[in-house]
Image (cartoon, helix red, strand yellow):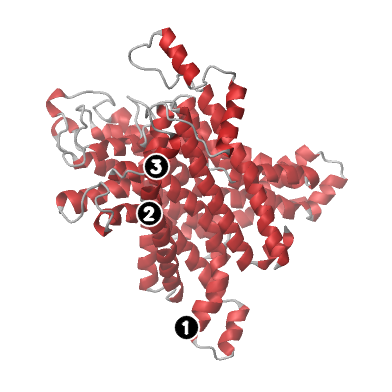
Amino acid sequence: MLKTKKNQFDSLNKDAIRRLFANKASVASLIVLSIILIISVFGPMILPNDLDTVYWDYIQSKPTTENFLIFGTDSNGRDLLVRTLSGGRVSISVAIIATLVALVVGVTYGAISGYVGGRTDAVMMRIVDIIYAMPFMFVVILLVVVFGRSIMMIYLALGLVEWLDMARIVRGQTLSLKTKEFIISANALGVSNFSIIRKHIIPNVIGPVVVYMTLTIPKVILIESFLSFLGLGVQEPNTSWGVLISEGTALMEVAPWMLIYPSIFLVVCILAFNFLGDGIRDAFDPKTR
Amino acid sequence: MNTYLIFIFKRFLQSIPTLWLVITISFFMIRLAPGGPFDMERQLPPVVEANLKAYYNLDKNLFIQYFDYLSGILQGDFGPSYNYRDFSVADLILDGLPYSAIVGFWSLLLAIFGGILLGSISALYRNSYVDYTLMTFSMLGLAIPNFVLAPVLILWLCVWNDWFPAGGWGDGGFANLALPVITLGTAYMGNIARTTRGAMIEALGANHIRTARAKGLPEKLVVWRHAMKSAMIPVVSYLGPVSAGIITGSLVIEQIFGLPGVGRYFVQGALGRDYTLVMGTVILYGGLIIIANLIVDIIYGFLNPRIREEK
C-alpha cells in the first residue's frame, strides 16, 4: 500500500522532469546557466590575470588580445573579464544562499502554521501580512547601511525578504494536505506532529516550492545588483555585477565596454532563470501553459 | 455596499499599525548604527559636539527621543535636517516630491496601460507571431533591470546619437521625462503584460464568455467588457508590488538621470546618519507603499466580491 503511494509520487516527478526536458527554452536556459556557472567558478582560477592585478600601461583599455585582456580593463587597469566572472561568482552565490535561507525559513514557518492551524495559524499569518506590507527595500537598505556593508549582511537581508511568499505558498498547500487520508492515518497511528511535517508534509509541497525557488533566484540577483549599484553591496576588491555596472555607468562615455559586458552577463543570467522558472512551472502544472 | 464600506474601513485601520511598525523599526535601526551625524574628517571639539547634540536633543534618553519624535510627527513636524543645515526635513521633501511624483505617475500609467494593452493583444492572438514577439519583448523588459536599461539608453540615445538630453529636469517636458519614465516603467509593463495574457486566456475560456458569445454580443463587447473584468483580478492584485517597485526604482533612476527628486535624500541621509532625513523619507516612501496596497485591496474587493465577504 505504502509502496504504490511512493511509486505514484516518483512517476509524477518523473513526468514533470520529462516535460521540462521536452521544453526547448528550458533546456537552452539550463545550458546557458551551466556555462555561466562553470566559467564564473573556474574562469578566475584558469585565466592568467588576477582579480586585482593592475596593468599600468592598460588603464581603461579597450578590449585587446594583449595580456589576454579580451574584455578590456577598468579605470584601475584591472582585467575586466576576470572581474566580470568573479562578480558572477558573488552574484550567483548571494542568490543561491539567500534563496536557501528563504527556503528553510519559509517552508518551516508555512508548514507549522498550516499544520497546527487554529489560533496559532491566525497569529502567524497575521505577522506575515504585517511584514509583507512593509516597504522592504527600505528596511533592507537600512539593515545594510546600519550593520555594515558585508556579503553576510546581504545574504541575511535578502533571505529575510524572500521567505514570506514561500511561507504563504507552503501554508496553502499544507492546509489542503492536512485533510488527506494518509496524514489523518499517520496522526491516528500516533506519529508526532514534527515527524508528520518533516516526513509527509514537506516532501509533498516540494513541487510549488521548487517553482517558486527558481523564480526567486533571479529576483535576488536583481536586488543584490540594485544594492551594489547604490554602493551598498559588495566592497572592493571584491566585486559583483551590480558594482561593475555602476562603475561602467560612471564611465560609459569613454569606456562603454565597462558597462556592456557585465550588463550582458546579468541580463542573460536573469533571462535564463526566468525561462527556466516558467518551464519548471509548466512542467509541474501543465494546466497553466 | 454596507459590508464593503466596513471592509474598507477595517483595511484602513490595519494599515496604521504597519506604518507605526515601520517608523519604530527604522528609528531604532538608524540610531543603533555606529557613527553619528556630526562625525567629520576633522574631530569637533568635545564641547562643540556636546552643544550641537544638546541643541538637537540628541543627548536625551533614546526612548524619550523616540516619543518626542512620534509626537512631533503627529503634529506634522519632521524635525530639522542635520546635514542640510537650515533646512527642515519637510522643506527638503516637499521640494523634491513634485519631481518624483511626476516621474512615478507617468511610469505607473505606462506600466499599467501599456501592460494591459500588450497582454490583451497577446491573448487575443494567442500562439501567433504577434504573441511570441510581444511576449519576448515583455520577458526582455522584465529581465533588464532599470539600472542597466537607463545607462544603455543614455549611451545610445544621448551620447552616440544626440536625440535626448542625457539628464536633468530641464523644463520637465517630454524630452526630459521620456527616458526616466520608460526605464522605470518597462520592467513592470512586461510583468503586467504577462499576467494579463494569462488571465485573459483563462477568462476567454470561461463559461460566462461562452454565454455572452452565444447571446450574440459583439466580439468587442465580449472581450473588452466581460472578459476584461475577470481578467483584471490577478492584474490588480499585482499592482501593489508594482507600485512598491516603481517607488524604490525611483531611487536609482533619479540618481542616474540627475533628477531633483526625493530619492537621493534616502541613501545620502542613511550614509551620512542624517537621522531625521532618513526617517522622513522612510515615512514618505513607506506611507506611499502602504497607501498603494490599500488602494489595490479596495479595487480588488470591488472586482472580486468573495474577498470582501470573507473578511
How crowded pointer 3 is (Cα within 10 Å; few <14, some 14-19, many 20+) is rated as many
Horizontal arrangement in the rendering, residue B277 relative to residue A184 (left or right): left
Residue B163 shows in this picture: yes
Task: Say what amino acid the circle numbered 3 marks.
Answer: Val
Three-letter amino acid code of the residue under disc 1:
Lys
Is residue B152 toward the left or the right of residue B287 in the image? left
Chain letter, disc 1 residue: B
Find the distance from the CA under tag 2 to the CA under tag 1: 33 Å
The residue pinned by badge 1 equals B220
Q: Secondary structure at mark 3?
A: loop
Quadrant of the image containing the N terminus of chain A? bottom right
The answer to whether residue A90 is seen in the rendering is no
Question: On the picture, is B55 further left or further right than B85?
Answer: right
Mark 3 or 1: the one toward you? 3
Which mark, by number, is residue B102? 2
State the CA–CA distance, disc 2 to disc 3: 12 Å
Q: Which residue is mark 3?
A: B262
The residue lying toward the viewer, choosing from A83 and B171, is: B171
